[in-house]
């Protein structure tokens, strides 16, 4: 099979929900400037997340027994895409809602589900991802952070890197080695780590524009109890791969630059050039198409399928478009990017340019994604 | 897809496998009308697949009917299947008896930036006079009739013009498919002209663009298959070239463009029966056109010199891709239209426009 299948997204009666979300956002974000909206899903606001929790818009698809709302994947998709299109500050709960919660739901212990999931759904409990390390980026199976079994739990030593919002999160899902280094994928497990654990130190890493999202999280003989094991010992690799299908196909994989497109349309006004119309139309065509692909993946996830390949494909295509938007803006309007500019377009452009390199790095680099696609084509 | 849809696609696939041979393709390109192939297509009922059930059709979901067009494109079927499907739908909608045989379509819509040769339809002696020029009509000189959508006194009408009633200046596209200029100056009988039901000249042009989008998606699926197969078979430096990362990365891009084109074509298929003002066809033509360009280039790069020969079959698909992307409006034109609507919707209207598409 060399052609990947993307079935039509399942029909969903979502327009009432969409209107509700739009009303909510129009009120909540009335004062949010475009330059802040441009942060997209990097904008962190714990109060906003709590409000979403109150609305029932976090953990939407989870069972009610765990604080969820038993809505469909397509309903959840509507909430996500409306948040992103509006530039809402969703970072606080994003990771927990997208992958940590679903992982716990799938393979976590009953205790983990009972204690954690309702707090995530309430918008009160935030997660970060513990995958990358100094010597393990794209080559995730090279992780060296080691959890050594001891009486009642594990002693963990090692360093996690590029941990977004670790400094504001309650928990990390730690991907670590519990078997030998030579076992590669097989000797890995996942632990639910309370970031207040003694022996866990979080240090900031500034990104190229000087902002602090990233961290280095150092484990120095930290004791993690047995009850923190997620799923089965040695099953870490398979569990992580399952997480990635959720991580790679959502609307955040093609809407990261959407605020810039909105501001471009605003700046073009009533009398755009043919070139500007063509450029905006082309981007619109890309976004509509990506949205269809991404909703198709949401439908497959809802049906319990494993669309890991399709997800990689959506992310690869999406990042290309996200990174193209600043180039296109430059081609049709004359504006110097500046974070301090009075005009919102210049500030949004500046923000997008400074963040664009990450779009094809985070969540799997372009090259890794294409390798996954090539494997799916039967080439490796 | 429903059971009926699956059967339709399977049957069409088997048929095209049999009838589209290298010899048949060569003969069609030399200007011969593939009558036997057409008869086989007609016997399956495919040209009537878009006709609604209450107008004498089979009651097939239009999206599933158009899957047959996608499959036909994957085989480079050298016949106006999609055009005939559209023409029969237009005739049925207007209550005009279909003549049977292959048909084509011509819209009186004038593409932006082209010299105008207006097609006029005016009442005359109880019948109608049709005058004007239709440019690059698919198989215009080969079919048994051309269905024209033109305005008469501001009202869109459908006219069935039988072969022999117009002059033909033959032409072809890059793949050798007939694209003929037709000059009309004829008197039509009342039974051959009727008000169009919900179709305008612009709408017919959009339906043509939808067809080409669907065909591009179909051809790309096959191009991807062929290219992956070639990369696995062709060895250099002691191993299949598909084992090299540079080739793998290119093929991944090809797969991405193919998937995007397929999704965009799905939108076009869903929109082909929708009223005017729907943006999905503009999305589809813009996106599939771009995909065709990127994908054809990669396919040729991976195939190397052999893919550049006339003997190899890749060009039957890539020459069609290069033609289809410019027919019924190229990606730039449809992008401009879409962009015009997006900018008119404004900063606050852009996102609602996207979610409505």
Image (cartoon, rainbow, N blue to C red):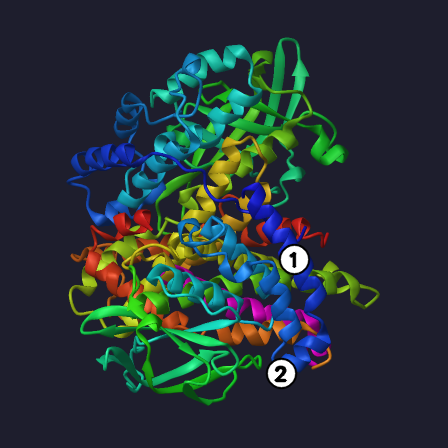
**What chain letter is assigned to the residue under label 1?**
B
Residue at mark 1: B13
Q: Which residue shows up at 45% across the image and 12% down it?
A: A115
Residue located 57% across and 12% down the image: A227
Kindly report the distance in space between the C-alpha atoms of the residues bearing marks 1 and 2.
23 Å
Report crowding for label 2: few under 14, some 14 to 19, many 20 or more residues within 10 A (C-alpha).
few
Left or right of A14? Residue B225 is: right
Judge left or right: residue A155 versus residue A127. Answer: right
The magenta stretch spans which residues? B282-309
Image side of residue A353 versus residue B26, left or right: left
Q: Quick one: label 1, few (<14), some, or many (20+) residues within 10 Å? A: some
Dot 1 and dot 2 within a common chain: yes
Q: Position of residue B174 (x, y in %)?
A: 54, 81
In the rendered image, residue A148, in percent from the top left (x then y), is placed at: 67, 20
- Give me the chain letter of mark 2: B
> Is residue B160 within the magenta segment?
no
Q: Nearer the viewer, residue B156 or A157?
A: B156
Mark number for residue B32? 2
Q: Image check: B77 left or right of B47?
A: right
- From the image, give the main secondary structure of the stretch colored magenta: helix
SS class, disc 2: loop
Q: Residue at x 20, y 55 (%)?
A: A344
Does the stretch in magenta take in B305? yes
Is B337 situated above or below A261?
below
Above or below, A49 relative to B125: above
In the rendered view, would you say B162 is above or below B74? below
Question: Is residue A89 visible in this depiction of the protein?
Answer: yes
Q: Are marks 1 and 2 in contact (CB under 8 Å)?
A: no
Report the disc number at residue A255. Answer: none
Compare marks 1 and 2 and give the one earlier in the sequence: 1
Q: Nearer the viewer, residue A168 or B209?
A: B209
């Amino acid at each position: 099979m060399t052609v990947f299948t993307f079935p039509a997204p399942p029909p969903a009666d979502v327009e009432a929900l969409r209107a509700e979300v739009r009303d909510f956002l129009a009120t909540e974000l009335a004062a949010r400037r475009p330059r802040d909206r441009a942060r997209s899903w990097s904008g962190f606001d714990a109060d906003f997340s709590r409000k979403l929790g109150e609305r029932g818009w976090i953990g939407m698809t989870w069972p009610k027994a765990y604080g969820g709302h038993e809505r469909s994947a397509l309903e959840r998709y509507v909430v996500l895409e409306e948040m992103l299109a509006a530039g809402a500050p969703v970072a606080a709960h994003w990771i927990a809602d997208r992958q940590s919660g679903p992982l716990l739901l799938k393979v976590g212990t009953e205790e983990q589900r009972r204690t954690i999931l309702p707090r995530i759904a309430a918008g009160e409990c935030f997660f970060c991802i513990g995958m990358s390390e100094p010597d393990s980026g794209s080559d995730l199976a090279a992780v060296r952070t080691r959890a050594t079994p001891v009486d009642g739990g594990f002693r963990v030593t090692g360093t996690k890197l590029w941990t977004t919002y670790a400094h504001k999160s309650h928990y990390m899902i730690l991907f670590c080695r519990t078997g030998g280094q030579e076992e590669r994928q097989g000797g890995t497990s996942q632990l639910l780590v309370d970031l207040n654990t003694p022996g866990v130190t979080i240090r900031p890493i500034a990104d190229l524009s000087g902002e602090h999202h990233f961290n280095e999280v150092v484990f120095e003989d930290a004791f993690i109890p047995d009850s923190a094991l997620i799923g089965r010992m040695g099953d870490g690799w398979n569990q992580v791969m399952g997480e990635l299908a959720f991580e790679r196909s959502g609307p955040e994989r093609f809407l990261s630059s959407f605020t810039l497109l909105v501001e471009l349309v605003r700046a073009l006004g009533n009398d755009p050039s043919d070139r500007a119309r063509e450029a905006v139309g082309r981007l619109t065509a890309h976004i509509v198409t990506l949205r269809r692909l991404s909703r198709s993946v949401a439908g497959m996830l809802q049906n319990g399928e494993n669309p890991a390949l399709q997800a990689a494909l959506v992310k690869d295509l999406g990042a290309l478009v996200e990174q193209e938007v600043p180039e296109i803006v430059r081609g049709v309007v004359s504006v110097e990017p500046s974070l301090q500019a009075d005009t919102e377009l210049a500030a949004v452009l500046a923000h997008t340019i400074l963040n664009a390199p990450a779009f094809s790095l985070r969540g799997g680099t372009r090259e890794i994604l294409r390798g996954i696609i090539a494997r799916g084509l039967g080439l490796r | 897809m429903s059971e009926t849809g699956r059967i339709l696609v399977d049957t069409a696939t088997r048929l095209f496998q049999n009838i589209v041979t290298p010899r048949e393709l060569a003969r069609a390109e030399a200007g011969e009308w593939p009558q036997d192939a057409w008869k086989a297509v007609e016997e399956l009922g495919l040209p009537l697949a878009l006709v609604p059930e209450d107008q004498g059709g089979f009651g097939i979901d239009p999206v599933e009917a158009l899957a047959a067009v996608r499959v036909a494109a994957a085989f480079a079927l050298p016949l106006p299947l999609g055009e005939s499907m559209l023409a029969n739908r237009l005739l049925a909608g207007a209550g005009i008896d279909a003549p049977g045989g292959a048909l084509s379509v011509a819209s009186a819509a004038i593409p932006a930036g082209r010299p105008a040769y207006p097609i006029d339809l005016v009442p005359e002696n109880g019948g109608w006079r049709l005058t004007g020029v239709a440019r690059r009509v698919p198989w215009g000189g080969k079919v048994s009739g051309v269905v024209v959508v033109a305005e008469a006194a501001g009202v869109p009408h459908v006219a069935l013009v039988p072969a022999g009633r117009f002059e033909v200046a033959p032409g072809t596209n890059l793949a050798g498919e007939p694209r003929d200029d037709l000059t009309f100056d004829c008197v039509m009988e009342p039974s051959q002209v009727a008000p169009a039901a919900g179709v305008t000249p612009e709408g017919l042009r959009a339906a043509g663009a939808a067809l080409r989008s669907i065909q591009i998606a179909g051809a790309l699926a096959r191009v991807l298959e062929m290219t992956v197969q070639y990369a696995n078979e062709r060895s250099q430096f002691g191993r299949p070239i598909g084992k090299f990362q540079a080739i793998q990365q290119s093929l991944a891009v090809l797969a991405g463009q193919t998937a995007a084109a397929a999704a965009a074509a799905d939108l076009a298929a869903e929109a082909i029966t929708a009223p005017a003002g729907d943006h999905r066809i503009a999305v589809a033509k813009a996106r599939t056109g771009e995909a065709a360009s990127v994908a054809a280039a990669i396919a040729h790069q991976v195939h190397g010199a052999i893919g550049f020969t006339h003997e190899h079959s890749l060009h039957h698909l890539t020459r069609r891709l290069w033609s289809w992307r410019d027919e019924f409006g190229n990606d730039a034109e449809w992008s401009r239209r879409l962009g015009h609507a997006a900018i008119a919707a404004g900063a606050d209207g852009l996102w609602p426009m996207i979610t409505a598409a």
